[in-house]
Image (spheres, rainbow, N blue to C red):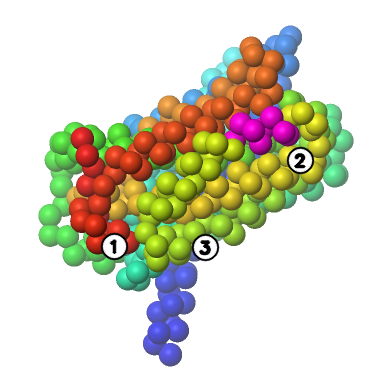
Amino acid sequence: MIASSERQSKIWSVVRVSSGNFLEMYDFMVFGYYAAAIGNAFFPSGSAFVSLMFSLMTFGAGFLMRPIGALVLGAYTDRHGRRAGLLLTLGLMSAGIFTIACMPGYSTIGLLAPLLVVIGRLLQGFSAGMELGGVSVYLSEIATPGHKGFYVSWQSGSQQVAVMVAASVGVVLNSILPPEKMQQWGWRVPLLLGCIIVPFLFRLRKSLQETDEFLARKHRPETSEILSTLANNWAIVVVGTLMVTMTTVSFYMITAYTPTFGNSVLHLASADSLVVTLCVGASNLFWLPIMGALSDRVGRRPLLFGCTLLMLVTAYPAMLWLVREPSFARLLMVELWLSFIYGSYNGAMVVFLTEIMPLEVRTSGFALAYSLATAIFGGFTPALSTYLIHISGNRAIPGLWLSFAAACGLAATLLARPHSPVAEVDRPVAVES
């Protein structure tokens, strides 16, 4: 009975801590799905390509704030506690989503509209800079012995639920509203739905308990100490950034960019692209906990090696096969293959990243590595892919971008070495500088 009660308590802790992560990714996905409509509303121009690029660059701009948020909010969390930091990020995130959902268009308030939308995205990016790290560290610190990979995988798992919910809302809206209505105001509906659930998410997070591991720490470092420790461990942060590059590029490629790629590049129906995205979210959600649990048994590095090599050699050929004869079935098959690689890699990678960071800067170090990778590489994946296709005429070129990200992940896996040849599972890792 006690074991059952404790298991139920752990499950609810996972749900509560992941709830804000869901909101953050839900909002990012909605922005990515409706990038063209948002471009028309806030960045109108005589060229559909220019409006789309402005919208996608705004999507990417939010990621530029992530490293700053990782340092500021990560240091706050490492000093004041996991619970306090997660509540703060949820508040900032909520302000960002309200700003974009309720902002009048360019035709109503002129240049003020795109300016405020960009500010809203920057605020979201600032809060997201710590959100992923905070959730991952919290889950790693409440995990039962030998199950850390399984627990931490639910950080990414909550993101996949957000992908599925956002795609499902999109499928329903596209079946109800004609395309012109979706362009005019329909794209706001998913954002407003996100606003509605904010009070419920706050209630969930307020009931979080601080982790025993944090409470047991006798020393709470000042911000200056945290920054100094991060500087002394710069090699770990760099390796972590390269490791996350594989995750963040592949994730935004197969989720946020899929509707735009399917509709604007492959000229498939919007509903078909959203259905594929929904299936990708379900596939990610299936593979992440399974591979996280597998990494608890066989170690992290075998999965990291295998997945980076698979992505390196198959991404571009798969994209070439897709663009040769675009269809719903081919898009689904390619995306599910990429989803399998992403889910398998990320199931091991996220927990591995928590393990290589020094305890005193675990949140800020994780968040900084994750944020740098997203800001430099992942967040601009939709915009970069669109631009590369535009200048090269090669619709399969996003596959080369995925291969580059895989090469970064492979290099990072080679550089990260365990302290001893004994089991890597649940052990800290050193980095060769």
Q: Is residue 268 above or below residue 94?
A: above
> Which element type, helix, strand or loop, lies under badge 3?
helix
Q: Which residue is mark 2?
A: 330
Please tell me how crowded label 1 is: few (under 14), some (14-19), or many (20+) other residues with Cα within 10 Å.
some
Image location of residue 103, percent across then percent down: 62, 30
Mark 2 surroundings: few (<14), some (14-19) or many (≥20) residues within 10 A = some
- Give the secondary structure at mark 2: helix
Answer left or right for 400 relative to 297.
right
Task: Give the labeled residue for mark 1.
Answer: 423
Tell me the kind of residue under disc 2. Arg
Quadrant in which residue 260 is drawn: top right
Residue 373: image location, x then y, percent? 41, 33
State which quarter of the image contains the C terminus: top left
- Badge 2 vs badge 1, beta-carbon distance below 8 Å: no
For marks 2 and 3 on the same chain, the one whose residue lies earlier in the sequence: 3
Q: Using the image as rendered, state which of residue 202 and residue 247 is in the foreground.
A: 247
Q: Residues within 10 Å of mark 3 (few under 14, many from 20)?
A: some
Numbered mark located on residue 378 in the image: none
Quarter of the picture holding the N terminus:
bottom left
Q: CA distance from mark 2 to mark 1?
A: 40 Å
Q: Residue furthest bottom?
A: 1
Q: Is residue 168 visible?
A: yes
Image point 25% across, 52% down: which residue?
Answer: 418
The three-letter code of the residue at mark 3 reads: Ile
Decide: marks 3, 1 in contact (CB < 8 A)? no
**Could you tell me the amino acid type at mark 1?**
Ala
Q: Sequence-wise, which precedes: disc 3 or disc 1? A: 3
